[in-house]
Image (cartoon, rainbow, N blue to C red):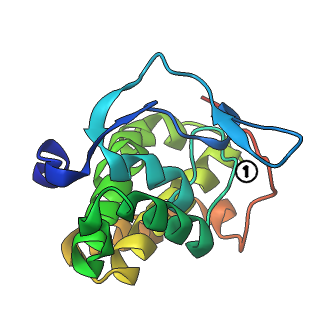
Amino acid sequence: MAELADPGPFLALTNGDTESHNFLTGPSGGGRLTDFEGAGFRRALTATTSFTVPGPDWLGVSGPSQVEAFRRALARTVPEAEDDQRFGFGLASASASMVWVMMRTGRLKTLDARSPGNDSRTQMVALLESGARTAEAHRVLPHLAAWCRSTAALLHRRWPDTDIDTAAPYTWRER
């Protein structure tokens, strides 16, 4: 949380909701961000969370190529983005500590009350595993990564229906 509270050179204006459903593509291949009611100055790496962990509507744009494209664009104005350790720690902090993992785990009691097979349960496990993978890939936040892994494993045991290799694309979760 301290990493997110003090953005240092990574302070930037973001729309606050860079999920794929808030990006409109144009006929020439370009695009525009929409949905600016949450806009403000914050740590730029919070805008990358949709590349590393499933978002609220489970629409995926994830992958290393998107993260690296974002990193290259950011490094043009924030040279600190080229530092692997600093970028990795910031990315993992934004992905695991921020909204997508830590705040969403507050929904565990609600998800536990849902019937087996509910896609929201599967999304929660995928969310925890993604947060762990991001931290592990950058070799940062080992305790948080371990907590995400162990919680995902516990939920797999509690919710055996979540033990799937992949979720169907464009799966909407119940709120």
Quadrant location, the C terminus: top right
The percent coordinates of residue 17 (x first, y second) are: 50, 33
How many callouts does the rendering have?
A: 1
Relative depth, front residue between 61 and 81: 81
- Asked if residue 7 lies left or right of residue 138, the reply is left
Is label 1 in a helix, a strand or a loop? loop
| Residue 173 visible here | no
Residue found at the very far front of the displayed protein: 76
Residue at 66% across, 46% down: 58
Residue at 25% across, 51% down: 10
Residue found at the very far top of the displayed protein: 37
The percent coordinates of residue 122 (x first, y second) are: 63, 55
The percent coordinates of residue 113 (x first, y second) are: 54, 36
The percent coordinates of residue 56 (x first, y second) are: 57, 39
- Asked if residue 175 lies left or right of residue 8, the reply is right
Q: Amino acid at mark 1?
A: Gly
Q: Which residue was labeled with disc 1?
A: 117
Q: Is residue 132 above or below residue 101?
A: below
Residue at 80% across, 55% down: 169
Relative depth, front residue between 51 and 159: 51
Residue at 82% across, 38% down: 26
| Residue 118 visible here | yes
Q: Is residue 169 above or below residue 25?
A: below
User: Few, some or many C-alpha atoms within 10 Å of disc 1 (few <14, some 14-19, many ≥20)?
Assistant: few
Which of the 4 image quadrants contains residue 165? bottom right
